[in-house]
Image (cartoon, rainbow, N blue to C red):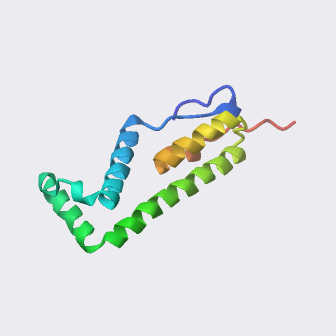
């Protein structure tokens, strides 16, 4: 982990591009299977396409509920990131907003950076 910044009230660390891509593609595909399943080229996706087709045909309610559950979890993580910012002494509201947005979009991939952050303790006299 990189060294803490000089201004601990402004600590922010971006999620890796790899996880941003994986999560964006996964959520996008999940949304595609829930809202436009008739446009998916199942036969071009091999075994993954067969599995997706099975879920779309046999368990559409599970897909629909799972999609909204995933977004609910992202919302809960984003709200928790605000609480965690305050607990760890990150007081800058623009930085808190960045953590909220990043955690809402990328979930635990973002939140893990905030969880790992250990602010410097002030020396007591």
Q: Residue at point 31% right, 70% down?
A: 60
Q: Name above or below for residue 33 compared with residue 59.
A: above
Q: Name above or below for residue 4 compared with residue 27.
A: above
Q: Residue at point 72% right, 41% down?
A: 89
In the image, 32 versus 38, the foreground residue is 38
Q: Is residue 113 visible?
A: no
Q: Residue 77 location in percent, x, y?
A: 56, 54
Q: Residue 43 location in percent, x, y?
A: 12, 56
- Quarter of the view holding residue 63: bottom left
Q: In this rendering, would 101 be left or right of 28?
A: right
In the picture, the quarter occupied by the C terminus is top right
Q: Is residue 94 visible?
A: yes
In the image, 33 versus 73, the foreground residue is 33
In the image, 43 versus 99, the foreground residue is 43
Q: In this rendering, would 29 be left or right of 1?
A: left
Q: Residue 48 location in percent, x, y?
A: 19, 58
């Amino acid at each position: 982990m990189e060294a803490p910044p000089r201004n601990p009230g402004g600590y922010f660390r971006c999620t890796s591009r790899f996880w941003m891509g994986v999560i964006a593609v996964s959520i996008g595909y999940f949304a595609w299977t829930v809202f436009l399943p008739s446009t998916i080229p199942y036969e071009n996706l091999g075994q993954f396409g067969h599995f997706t087709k099975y879920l779309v045909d046999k368990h559409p309610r599970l897909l629909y509920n799972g999609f909204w559950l995933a977004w609910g979890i992202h919302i809960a993580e984003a709200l928790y990131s605000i609480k965690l910012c305050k607990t760890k002494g990150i007081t800058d509201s623009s930085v808190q907003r960045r953590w909220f947005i990043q955690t809402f979009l990328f979930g635990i991939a973002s939140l893990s950076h905030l969880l790992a952050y250990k602010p410097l303790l002030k020396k007591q006299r």
